[in-house]
Image: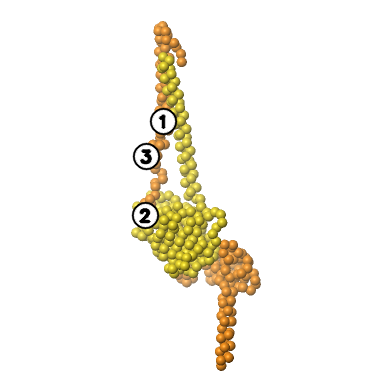
């Protein structure tokens, strides 16, 4: 009988232990979920900005059309093609059939000349990654190189990386220059979340950079 | 004759210098955006000045605009507001540097707000291109994760603690029931005189 008592007590103790452990794990799981959601929210609206002493802006170059763009830090190397606006007034990226190309808005500044040069590329096609698939990995301080038609290369330093919700899109901030007189560059792709019903992403990922160097 | 030639030749560099200097002094003023409506704000900037300060004047502006140095590049800039109710046309913008001598020139095009969407000849001069104003459509969704649904593995992981708690609770209930039965049996046994000790 004593053995039986000991056995029951052991089982009891073990069961209590398991119960408490499981309750604790469950509550931790709830906590993590809450944090994940908060993180996603913050990532959607927060901007990453260049900290510390910024590289000096280089004097703008003469206008020349872009032919290629390279971002070594995220493995992007692409041909640049000239694009216009679509009927909604947004810069039109290259068609999905040329999803490895980057489009440059030919109605704006040329990269390297004063003003904001705009480049747009797909993040993915309907089935696979595209030229700007890894653009969200870029960080302030990294370099973007644009090879120009006159044989020179313009080197830009990334200043801001931010996501804009399409509902509250600030066209001046995205397409307009941030500081007068500088040569600036924007790399834009889709960001936020993909909504299958609308067949569209909820926002734009915008990388802002300014000219800090040139190569002959 | 030769002396005349020499004289003119000597004048040439002087002429070139004067031309260059006046070109520099005439400078160029950038107004951004180039085309604006009454009430809009525009940025006025110039490289033409050597000093730290300048003033910009235009019939299109509400008031003279003060230009100051931006320390990133050697340039002066300021913000002006377009006056309400003025006639839509191009207006001259004059910037006077604080040395009181250098004057730089630019223009601002004031649009008729009632004719939005019809830019007219002014835009043709700039190649007919307007400023983009909408978010881009640059993704087909082929690599997007559907964020609302959980993968089976994730669901299992979340369910484990709950299942474990359930099993533990059942175990405890089972133990309690077992004890009850034992106690009941012990009582019965005690009553029938079997001699087993009742207790916990």
Q: Pointer 1: what residue?
A: B164
What residue sits 57% from the left and 62% below the top?
Answer: B72
Q: Chain of mark 2?
A: A
In this view of the protein, which residue sits in the foreground, A117 or A8?
A8
* Farthest residue, direction bottom: B1
In this view of the protein, which residue sits in the foreground, A80 or B34?
A80
Q: Which chain is orange?
A: B
Alpha-carbon span between mark 3 and mark 1: 18 Å
Q: Chain of mark 1?
A: B
Mark 3 or mark 1: whose residue is earlier in sequence: 3
Q: Chain of mark 3?
A: B
Image position, residue B75 (x, y; %): 58, 66
Q: Pointer 2: what residue?
A: A125
Q: Pointer 3: what residue?
A: B152
Residue A57 placement: quadrant: bottom right
Alpha-carbon span between mark 2 and mark 3: 27 Å
Specify the label residue B154 is tagged with.
none
Alpha-carbon span between mark 2 and mark 1: 44 Å
């Amino acid at each position: 009988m004593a053995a039986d008592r000991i056995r029951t007590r052991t089982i009891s103790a073990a069961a209590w232990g398991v119960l408490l452990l499981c309750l604790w794990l469950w509550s931790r799981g709830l906590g993590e979920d809450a944090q994940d959601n908060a993180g996603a929210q913050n990532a959607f609206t927060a901007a990453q900005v260049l900290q510390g002493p910024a590289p000096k802006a280089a004097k703008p170059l003469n206008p020349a059309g872009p032919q290629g763009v390279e971002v070594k830090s995220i493995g992007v190397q692409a041909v640049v093609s000239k694009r216009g606006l679509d009927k909604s007034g947004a810069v039109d990226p290259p068609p999905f059939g040329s999803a490895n190309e980057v489009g440059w808005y030919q109605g704006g500044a040329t990269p390297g000349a004063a003003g904001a040069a705009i480049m747009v590329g797909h993040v993915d096609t309907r089935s696979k990654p595209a030229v700007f698939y890894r653009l969200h990995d870029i960080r302030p301080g990294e370099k973007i190189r644009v090879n120009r038609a006159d044989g020179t290369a313009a080197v830009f330093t990334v200043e801001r990386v931010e996501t804009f919700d399409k509902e509250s899109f600030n066209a001046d901030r995205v397409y307009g220059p941030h500081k007068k007189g500088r040569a600036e560059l924007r790399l834009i792709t889709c960001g936020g979340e993909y909504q299958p019903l609308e067949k569209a992403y909820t926002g734009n990922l915008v990388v802002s950079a300014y000219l800090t160097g040139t190569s002959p | 004759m030769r002396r005349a030639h020499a004289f003119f030749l000597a004048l040439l560099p002087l002429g070139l210098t004067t031309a260059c200097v006046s070109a520099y002094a005439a400078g160029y003023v950038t107004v951004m955006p180039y085309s604006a409506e009454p009430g809009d704000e525009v940025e006025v900037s110039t490289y033409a000045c050597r000093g730290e300060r300048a003033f910009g004047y235009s019939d299109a502006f509400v008031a003279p605009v003060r230009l100051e140095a931006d320390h990133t590049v050697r340039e002066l800039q300021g913000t002006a507001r377009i006056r309400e109710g003025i006639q839509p046309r191009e207006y001259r913008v004059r910037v006077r540097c604080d040395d009181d001598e250098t004057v730089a020139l630019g223009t601002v095009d004031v649009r008729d707000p009632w004719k939005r969407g019809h830019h007219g000849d002014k835009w043709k001069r700039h190649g007919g291109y307007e400023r983009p104003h909408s978010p881009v459509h640059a993704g087909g969704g082929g690599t997007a994760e559907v964020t609302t649904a959980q993968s089976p593995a994730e669901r299992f992981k979340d369910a484990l603690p709950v299942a474990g708690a359930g099993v533990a609770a059942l175990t405890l209930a089972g133990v309690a029931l077992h004890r009850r039965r034992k106690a009941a049996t012990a009582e019965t046994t005690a009553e029938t005189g079997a001699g087993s000790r009742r207790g916990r």
